[in-house]
Image (tube, rainbow, N blue to C red):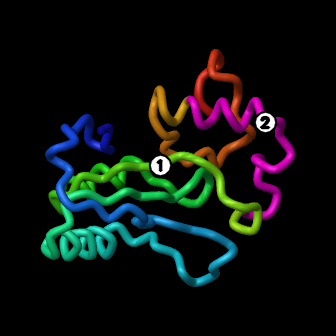
């Protein structure tokens, strides 16, 4: 299984929390941001102490995925963290988000890039992504 720190054998995953948001920012839940890395790491340590060994972070594109912070959190907490890709309903997108007016091919390209080259560290928060041959969003 691919985690934010690299591959882990399935037998090493242990107990899994299959739906978490370790970092999240969404206009649909004002004031409910999970952005403080220290607090998220402290909570992740508590999760690990409860017997959970792996956390699946289901935060979708554009809602604050922070792959570098997830890797630091995994290292500091001792948890395996699996990051997701995908999109949420438009109510969670900031006003004017690029993902709503683009065609399905661009949406798929972002998902494929997430899976094959890694999640954009800005969580695709820049302008509309380019085709994979041109590289990640700028």
Q: Check the picture and name the quadrant holding the N terminus.
A: top left
Where residue 120 appears, as percent x and y from the top left, is 52, 40
Q: Is residue 138 visible?
A: no
What range is drawn magenta here?
Answer: 94-112
* Helix, strand or loop at mark 2: helix
Tell me: 40 left or right of 61: left
Tell me: 46 left or right of 28: left
Picture disc at residue 76: none
As for residue 108 lying within the magenta part, the answer is yes
Q: Residue at x 59, y 60 (%)?
A: 63
**Is the residue marked by circle 2 packed among few (<14), some (14-19), or many (20+) residues within 10 Å?**
few
Q: Residue at x 39, y 72 (%)?
A: 36
Q: Residue at x 71, y 38 (%)?
A: 107
Q: Is residue 135 visible?
A: yes
Where residue 112 appears, as percent x and y from the top left, is 57, 30
For disc 2, the marked residue is 104
As for residue 14 lying within the magenta part, the answer is no
Whole-angstrom CA distance, mark 2 to mark 1, is: 19 Å
* Helix, strand or loop at mark 1: loop
In the foreground, 126 or 58: 58
**Is the residue marked by circle 1 packed among few (<14), some (14-19), or many (20+) residues within 10 Å?**
many
In the foreground, 56 or 94: 56
Q: Residue at x 62, y 54 (%)?
A: 62
Picture disc at residue 84: 1
Tell me: 73 left or right of 116: left
In the foreground, 2 or 73: 2
């Amino acid at each position: 299984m691919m985690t934010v720190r690299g591959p882990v054998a399935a037998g090493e995953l242990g107990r899994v929390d299959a739906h978490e948001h370790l970092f999240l920012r969404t206009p649909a839940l004002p004031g409910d941001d999970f952005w403080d890395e220290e607090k998220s790491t402290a909570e992740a340590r508590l999760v690990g102490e409860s017997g959970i060994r792996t956390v699946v972070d289901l935060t979708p594109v554009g809602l604050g995925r922070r792959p570098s912070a997830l890797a630091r959190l995994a290292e500091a907490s001792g948890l395996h963290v699996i990051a997701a890709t995908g999109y949420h309903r438009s109510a969670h997108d900031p006003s004017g988000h690029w993902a709503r007016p683009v065609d399905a091919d661009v949406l798929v390209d972002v998902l494929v890039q997430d899976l094959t080259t890694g999640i954009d560290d800005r969580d695709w928060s820049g302008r509309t992504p380019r085709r994979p041959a041109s590289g990640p969003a700028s």
